[in-house]
Image (cartoon, rainbow, N blue to C red):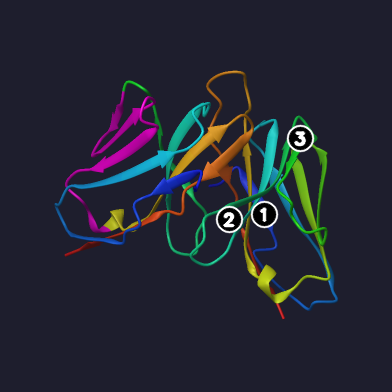
Amino acid sequence: ETGVTQTPRHLVMGMTNKKSLKCEQHLGHNAMYWYKQSAKKPLELMFVYSLEERVENNSVPSRFSPECPNSSHLFLHLHTLQPEDSALYLCASSQVRTENNSPLHFGNGTRLTVT
Amino acid sequence: RKEVEQDPGPFNVPEGATVAFNCTYSNSASQSFFWYRQDCRKEPKLLMSVYSSGNEDGRFTAQLNRASQYISLLIRDSKLSDSATYLCVVREGSDMRFGAGTRLTVKP
């Protein structure tokens, strides 16, 4: 049983729609992440929130907008997406410490299809 | 140059075989290292952390060479259930960098 839950599991949306992905972690971690996994590509880091502050944005298009209201919840707001944005979107959490940082714990992912 | 680079694979091996995966990373300041396993259409799951002294967990042995910036994973006595994609992961601060993964298929 995963300590990180994502909803929805599957999402089909048109290019003009607005939708949001939700993630919740029950592990007491202080960092949360959004990753994108496209077919036959490595996981791509989209956003990191550490101690509720966004610390990195890997030049992700502005049609993806993250929100982290507290250390347990993370959202990814989607609007005017393109078909090439179809992918598996994975949320993860970890405990970031000075040393011996914990590994990532992933949610089940949201499989997104943009039509 | 890719930040985390893995054997291209795929690896197709018979049950009982020993198989080794290699991984190199470009950032010498990387702090922590992990191997993850990902089954088809599922999320990645932690297989094991990798320590400088090397570590073993049953049939799995991980090694780290910081001087060469090299990580390895050895699987002994392969089982059918070991079939998956194995991801090398490197931590840089709060960021985790993933390799592209190596696909392993263990056949009867």
Kind of residue sitting beneath label 1 = Gln
| Number of residues whose C-alpha sits closer than 10 Å to that of mark 1, classed few (under 14), some (14–19) or many (20 or more) | many
Viewer-proximal residue, B77 or A45? A45
Q: Are marks 3 and 1 in contact (CB under 8 Å)?
A: no
Which residue is drawn at the image coordinates 30% and 46% (left, top)?
B21
User: Bounds of the magenta span?
Assistant: B54-80
Which residue is drawn at the image coordinates 67% and 72% (left, top)?
A84
- Which mark is first along the chain, 3 or 2? 3
Kind of residue sitting beneath label 3 = Ser
Numbered disc 1: what chain? A
Q: Which residue is mark 3?
A: A71
Q: Which residue is mark 2?
A: A108
List x then y, in percent, for residue A81: 78, 70
State the quadrant of the C terminus of chain A: bottom right
Q: Which residue is mark 1?
A: A6
Kind of residue sitting beneath label 2 = Asn
Q: Is residue B64 magenta?
A: yes
Numbered disc 2: what chain? A
Badges 2 and 3, same chain: yes
- Which mark is first along the chain, 1 or 2? 1
| Number of residues whose C-alpha sits closer than 10 Å to that of mark 3, classed few (under 14), some (14–19) or many (20 or more) | many
Q: Is residue A25 magenta?
A: no
As measured in the structure, the alpha-carbon distance from the residue carrying label 2 to the one carrying label 3 is 19 Å
List x then y, in percent, for residue A69: 85, 41
Residue A22's place in the image compared with B92, above or below, is below
As measured in the structure, the alpha-carbon distance from the residue carrying label 3 to the one carrying label 1 is 15 Å
Viewer-proximal residue, B3 or A28? B3
Q: Are marks 2 and 1 in contact (CB under 8 Å)?
A: yes
Q: Secondary structure at mark 3?
A: loop
